[in-house]
Structure formats: C-alpha cells, structure tokens
Amino acid sequence: MARFKAAGVEPGQRQLNGPQTTGRQYRNLSTALHGTTREDNVPIPVRDGTQLMADIHRPDEEGRFPALLAAAPYPRQLQDLGAPAAIIEAGASDYWVPRGYAHVIANLRGTVGSGGVYTFFDEQERKDLFDLVEWIAEQPWCDGNVGMIGISYYAMSQLEAATQRPPHLGALFPFNVTVQVREAVYHNGLLNEAFVNPWIHALGVLSAHGDRLYRKGLSRLLRRFFAIPAIHRRFRQADAVQVHRRLRLISRFGHDAHPWNGLLAAVATDHPTRDAWWDERDLTGLLADVDIPVCLGGEWSSVPLHLTGLFEAWDALAHNPNVRMAMLGEHSLPWPWESMHIEALAWFDYWLKGRDTGILEGPTIRYWLPGPNSGAPPTPGPRLPPTPPWHSAPTAPLRPTSGRASVVTPPTARTPCQDS
C-alpha cells in the first residue's frame, strides 16, 4: 500500500504527455483523492481451468470501485516502466487509481506467465476476455462496473471482449484498433513482413521472461530514470520509426520455437489468402450485436496498421447509438501511452459512475486537422492554444458505405449506470 504523486495536468501532478481531450471542456470529473495498493501476479481462472496472470492496481481505501481492464500479450510488468516502447500501451495506473478506478492489466493466454498457448486473436482469446471481465466484476473491490482501456492490441482486445457481450462490461475506449488482423498482416495482398516477422519473434522473446527481468535490478533503475520530468517530456513525440527499430532488436534474441515459429508460418505461408483461419480472426460480423458504449479513436498517420481498422470498426458499429469517434494528429498517441486520459475519464465517469460529464454533448465525430500555425496536436493543460484546430462532423454520424459517406440518424441511446 502506498501513496504517490498522481498523474494528470494540474500543478504538482506527474505531467501526462500528449493531447488529453478533443479540444473540449468537461465537468464533474473524478478528482485524484485516493492512494493506491497493488497486487502483482494474480492468477485469474478462465472456464477451461487455465490461469491468466494479472497485476491489479486499485484504490487503497475500503469500498467498491469501477474497474478498467487492459489485456494484451505484452508484459504487464512493464506497463509502468515509462519507456518510449510500443508495448507500453495499457494506460497510466497513476492516473486512474487516484480517481477511483481499479486498473487491471492482464496477460493473454500463453504470454508472460499466463497458462495455455497463445493463438492470436481467435475464438479462444475472446472467451478468455469474457471470463476476465466477469471475474473482475465479482471481486469485493469492484462495484460490478467494468470498462476496458488501452491502444493497439489493448484496443483490439476490447472489441474482442465486446463481441462476447459480458454482462458487466459497461464501456470501451479503443484507440488505434484493428478489426481484421489480416489487414494488418497483409497490405493489399502483400505480406507486411517488416512488421509481422519481428513482432511475432518479439512476443516470443518477451514471453520467455518474467519478474526477474521486468521488476528487479536494471528495470528498477530505468523506472527512476524515465520518471525524471525532463526525460519524460522528451517522449512527447516518440519517433515511431525508432520505436519499431527497437522492436526488431528485441526480436533477435532467442526464444522457444513453440508456438511462435508455428504462428509465423501460419500467417506467412500456411494461409497466404483469406480462408477460415483468417475468418476466425475477423470481428466485422461479430460486432453487429454489440451495444456497449464505444469511444473509438486513432491517428491519421497510423496507415500501416490501424487506420483502416478504425473505419472498419466505425462501420461495423453503425447500429450502435453509443459510439463516438476522435481522429487525432501525428504524435497524439506517444509511448508510453498516457494521452487522451481526460477524454477517457469523461467517458468512463459517465458510463461507469453515472456522472454528468458532458461527454455526449455535441457532434458524434471530432477530428483534428493541422491549422496554419500548428504542426502538432494541442498539448494539455495551460499550454492549450486558444483556438485548437479541432473540427466536428454533423451531429448525425457519417457512415462509410461502399466507399461513400452517408448520414444516418442515431437510434435511442443506452442509459449509463447511476452514480452511487
């Protein structure tokens, strides 16, 4: 149990990097009142008896709180490292816990200590995510309201969970998402080998290690170094090219052949064209029944991986009245990911705590475009320019249909939980 400096944009707080809202002001937001306690390496059983490992960060006071789940194959132990690495994408625990949320960071099946075999975005993974959500909701420190958070794979797992419709899953905040993993692996039929090969091998390397490397020794020193404000500020515009070069460097270290070599063979040689293997890893049709509130987002510059998936998710969720979208400029989602947290707080406070934050007021889509004097998105807090280059789509959302945009009228919205 420990009290520590909360993250945020106010004086005296650890300053978050990146833009924090879509240029709007919100009200009645949860404030940083709580200390934190954490439980590391908590085994969570799923329906077939496999145990998935999680770190649980939660308020240190007695009581029950809403929880935010972040789940991916990346080391949960490194999510508080503070490094500009493309695997640190679960969100800032030191922002969420002081504001009255539990933050549960879990490793998917077969990764970094979790039991079973990693099978990459398939039906088994979706079932595991359902079980994770429901396990969290039943814990004595949770009030039964569960949301999910994180970018990239942490965003993809949110939509995976949503397709299973867990009863206690109340809201999602997936930024930089992919709906059909084939679209990230193949670009117009060409294998994206420059990314896929090192990414799969890096997963094997990262899964071969645990607490000894990730929590002790050098990693402790690195946490202190990256926490130095002057060092942390340098990561505001992390160079994606350099970050992915580090991924390729990690991939050169040794790891077990199984299942990683087999997975690489599956995506690169065994299934070069769309077939049943890829269809199992396509969420498009499964999203048709999702009515959970979803705040989608992404960067215009994420063309190689997530931009297509963002619009595919928008289209697949066209029936859902509780969907909003934010399009961000370059360097808006730097690593470690801690941008857009105020926007996310307004979203989760509304849906999970029943607070009137104003998050649903105004247009359905907010998008950023560079203005004549702005080469980067607005920065948080008092550094916000007086007229940030944010724009709005019509109140009725634009839906891409067969390559054309059409306007539809939203159906009746879902009711949030009531503030206790």
Image: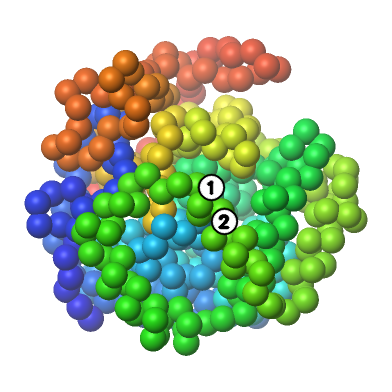
In this view, the residue in front, 219 or 52, is: 219
Residue 24 appears at what percent x and percent y? 25, 29
Residue 91 appears at what percent x and percent y? 38, 56
Q: Which residue is mark 2?
A: 245
Q: Which residue is mark 1?
A: 241
Task: Please report contact status of discs 2 and 1: CB closer than 8 Å, yes or no.
Answer: yes
What is the three-letter code of the residue carrying label 2? Arg
Q: Does 330 sit left or right of 166 as displayed?
A: left
Residue 2 appears at what percent x and percent y? 20, 78
| Secondary structure of residue under mark 1 | helix
Quarter of the rendering containing residue 267: bottom right
In this view, the residue in front, 390 or 174, is: 390
What is the three-letter code of the residue carrying label 1? Val
**Residue density around tag 1, few if under 14, some if 14–19, many if 20 or more, within 10 Å:** few
Residue 300 appears at what percent x and percent y? 50, 30
Q: Is residue 160 visible?
A: yes
Which residue: 67% across, 51% down? 195
Which residue: 84% across, 61% down? 265
Q: Is residue 158 visible?
A: no
Q: Does 10 sit left or right of 360 as displayed?
A: left
The quadrant of the image that shows the C terminus is bottom left
The residue most toward the left is: 11
| Secondary structure of residue under mark 2 | helix
Which residue: 45% across, 53% down? 150
